[in-house]
Image: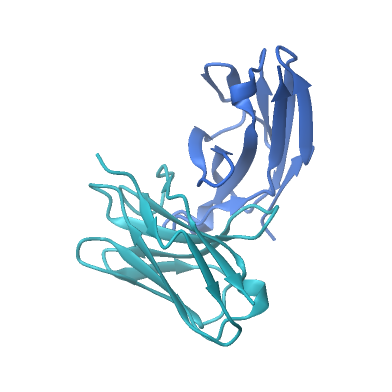
Amino acid sequence: EDQVTQSPEALRLQEGESSSLNCSYTVSGLRGLFWYRQDPGKGPEFLFTLYSAGEEKEKERLKATLTKKESFLHITAPKPEDSATYLCAVQARGSSNTGKLIFGQGTTLQVKP
Amino acid sequence: ETGVTQSPTHLIKTRGQQVTLRCSSQSGHNTVSWYQQALGQGPQFIFQYYREEENGRGNFPPRFSGLQFPNYSSELNVNALELDDSALYLCASSKNRGTNEKLFFGSGTQLSVL
């Protein structure tokens, strides 16, 4: 069964304290791995898509990496505005025409000033 | 460019009732997906509509049904509501179905079933 597990469930950081969020996945043929950010009371907002092991993408203080079994979202020198829930999702090859994404439960990040 | 809009934002229903949720897709998008997000969980795929046809379905019973209209807006209908249907219902649109299309989510409809 295709599955996504994120850790930790919650993370508290001081402003400027870098860290990483983990996304472990099992899927019958990875088509793509996605990272989304979700603020309270809002829908998820797209951050990155990764397609193959070894790929990396960056946006401001965020960097996403991918291996054959997991993905990391590295947050460098975070600011309070980075506080949100970060969701990881995978698309399996068998679902590539349906758009079905399998999401993890998310990591809730709180950055204190 | 208008984003994805959902209505209503909040809804309270009682067990056994029926509910209709609405979604207007982003301009230029022909595909709409619906997700259910329980409190503290990630979204779960309900189904996707592409050019007015159901294009894929997750593990949800037939009492969850949908429609897509010629202007690509969409409805999610849930019959015989159960307490476990209480959740945030998210609509997402994309330029085309399937492969690695970036999803644009609305802010959701918070459904409470009493």
Between A100 and A16, the residue placed more toward the observer is A16
Residue at (57%, 88%) from the top-left corner? B16
Q: Quadrant of the N terminus of chain B?
A: top left
Q: Is residue A18 left or right of residue B102?
A: right
- Scheme by which the image is coloured: by chain
Residue A64 visible in rendering: no
Q: Quadrant of residue A8?
A: top right
Between B32 and B53, the residue placed more toward the observer is B32
Residue at (36%, 52%) from the top-left corner? B5
Q: Quadrant of the C terminus of chain B?
A: bottom right
Residue B67 visible in rendering: yes
Q: Position of residue B74 (x, y in %)?
A: 33, 65
Q: Position of residue B53 (x, y in %)?
A: 31, 70
The colour one sees for chain A in the rendered image is: blue
The colour one sees for chain B in the rendered image is: cyan
Q: Is residue A14 left or right of residue A50?
A: right
Q: Position of residue B72 (x, y in %)?
A: 26, 61
Q: Quadrant of residue B52?
A: bottom left
Between B94 and B82, the residue placed more toward the observer is B82
Q: Is residue A22 left or right of residue B57?
A: right
Q: Position of residue A22 (x, y in %)?
A: 73, 34
Q: Is residue A47 left or right of residue A5?
A: left
- How many numbered marks appear? 0
